[in-house]
Image: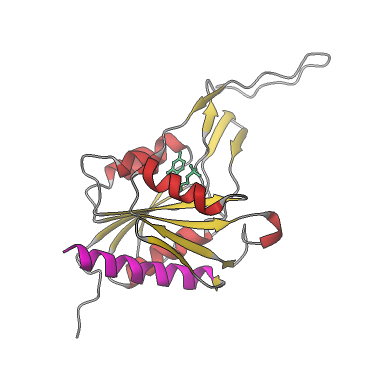
Amino acid sequence: AQPLPLSGKRAIVTSGPTHEPIDPVRYIANRSSGKQGHAIAAALAKLGADVTLVSGPVEIADPPGVRVVHVERAEEMLDAVVAALPSDIAVMVAAVADWRVATSAGEKIKKKPGEAPPPLQLAENPDILKTIGHHAARPKLVVGFAAETQDLEANARGKLKRKGADFIVANDVSPATGIMGGDRNSVKIVGNDGIEAWPDLSKQEVAERLADLIAKRLEALR
Ligand code: C5P
C-alpha cells in the first residue's frame, strides 16, 4: 500500500473560542463553533498526520484519530500549543479572544442594589499564531485564518506578513453569509504568490482541500 501523504508528519491545530473569565461564573468570548478547526484536524489525521488539536470550549465532539487538549483561556491555549512543538504543520483556526479580564475575581461578583456596574479592565492576550509564526522551533508550514466582515483580502495579506504565516485562509463572516456556526464555508487562500478563491463548500470539504494543499506544499518544501 502507498504511504499516506502526511504519515510521519506532526500537526498542531487550534479550534474553537477561548473563554476569558470575569469571575467563576462569567466570561467574555468570541463566537466560534469549532466546526472548521475540528474538521481540519480530522482531515490532516486522515492523511496520516500525527495531530494534536488544542480546543477551546465547544459543543461538538472530539474528532476521531487525533490527540485533543482541552483548554479554556488564550494563555492556556498558547501553553498547550508550545508544549506540542516541534511540529511540521501548524493550523491556527481558533477564534482567540484578543483581550482577557486583567484581574478576574476569585469569587462571584455580587450585584448590589443602587451600585454602579463594575468596570472591566482588559489586558491583551498573546497572539498564538504570531508567536508560532516567529518561534525558534517554527513549524515548516504555518497556516492562519482571517475572519473578516470587510476588506477581506487586504486584511488577510496584512496578517500573512505580521504573523509570519505561509498562507491565510480568509473568510467573510458577515452575518448575511451564514458561515458563523453554519456547515458551509466560502474561503480565499491568500499566500505570498497570490490569492486563490475556492467555491462555496462544506466545512468538511474545505478541511479536506486544505489538508491536500498542506501535503502538497510540504512535499514541495522537501
Ligand atoms: O488578528 P486575527 O485574530 O484576526 O487573526 C486571526 C488568526 O490569528 C487566526 O488564525 C487565529 O487563530 C489567530 N490568532 C491567534 N491568537 C490570537 C489571535 C488570533 O492565534 N490571540
Residue 147 place in picture, x, y as percent: 54, 51
Q: Which residue is nearer to you in this view: 168 or 7? A: 168
Q: Which residue is drawn at 40% across and 41% down?
A: 77
The residue range painted magenta reads 202-222
Way the structure is coloured: secondary structure
Whether residue 173 is situated above or below residue 217 in the rendered picture? above
Residue 119 place in picture, x, y as percent: 67, 18
Q: Residue 94: in sight, yes or no?
A: no
Main SS category, magenta section: helix
Q: Furthest-right residue in view?
A: 114
Q: Furthest-top residue in view?
A: 115
Q: Which residue is drawn at 62% across and 63% down?
A: 182
Q: Is residue 3 left or right of residue 171?
A: left
Asked where in the image residue 105 lies, by quadrant, the reply is top right
Residue 42 place in picture, x, y as percent: 40, 66
Q: Is residue 104 left or right of residue 214?
A: right
Magenta stretch: includes residue 216: yes
Magenta stretch: includes residue 137: no
Q: Which residue is nearer to you in this view: 47 or 219? A: 219
Quarter in which the C terminus is drawn: bottom left
Q: Which residue is nearer to you in this view: 181 or 154? A: 154
Quarter in which the N terminus is drawn: bottom left
Q: Residue 188: in sight, yes or no?
A: yes
Whether residue 78 is situated above or below residue 219 in the rendered picture? above
Whether residue 125 is situated above or below residue 154 in the rendered picture? above
Q: Furthest-left residue in view?
A: 222
Q: Furthest-bottom residue in view?
A: 1
Q: Which residue is drawn at 67% across and 62% down?
A: 178
